[in-house]
Image (spheres, helix red, strand yellow):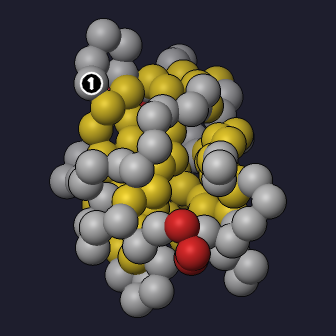
Amino acid sequence: QLQLVESGGGLVQPGGSLRLSCAASGAALDPHAITIGWFHQAPGKNHEEVACLHLWRKDTSYAAQVAGRFAISIDNAKTTVYLQMNNLKSEDTGTYFCARSWHDDCRNPANSWGRGTQVTVSS
């Protein structure tokens, strides 16, 4: 029943920044997941995990290609998860999705993919 809605994407030049949001509809995330992650889908490619947050411990992990540039966080009400993206590169272009998991990491998301939010990095 819990749905996640992504927003905040847009067109940005290389080196620019964006902040993506993932809003849970009607409830906090804690009762419905252990971890939540952000996934990147480049055109013609599979979904690839880029960031993961443990909802209780607040541990974070990042894919090597975004480490040091992206940061995942959650608000105090635990209803919205963010992805701060800095120093964006052309290879960051694609659709970004958030997804929850019952595992200690963000593997095997619990639900099907939503609509995502589009990020385009271009000069």
Residue 11 image-quadrant placement: top right
In the image, residue 98 lies at what x, y percent? 50, 47
Q: Nearer the viewer, residue 41 or 27?
A: 27
Q: Which residue is drawn at 27% across and 24% down?
A: 46
Q: Which of 11 and 26 is in front in this view?
A: 26
Q: At label 1, which amino acid type do we have? A: Asn
Q: Residue furthest front?
A: 1
Q: Nearer the viewer, residue 102 or 23?
A: 102
Q: Would you place residue 106 above or below residue 75 in this image? A: above
Q: Residue at x 30, y 10 (%)?
A: 44
In the image, residue 121 lies at what x, y percent? 51, 25
Residue 87 left/right relative to 23: left
Q: Which residue is drawn at 37% across and 27% down?
A: 41
Residue 24 image-quadrant placement: bottom right
Q: Which of 59 and 70 is in front in this view?
A: 59
**How many callouts does the rendering have?**
1
In the image, residue 13 lies at what x, y percent? 56, 28
Q: Residue at x 80, y 60 (%)?
A: 26
Q: Mark 1 points at which residue?
A: 46
Q: Residue furthest right?
A: 26
In the image, residue 42 lies at what x, y percent? 35, 22
Q: Residue furthest bottom?
A: 57
The answer, for residue 68, to whether it is visible in the render is no
Q: Would you place residue 101 above or below residue 42 in this image? A: below
Is the residue marked by circle 1 packed among few (<14), some (14-19), or many (20+) residues within 10 Å? few
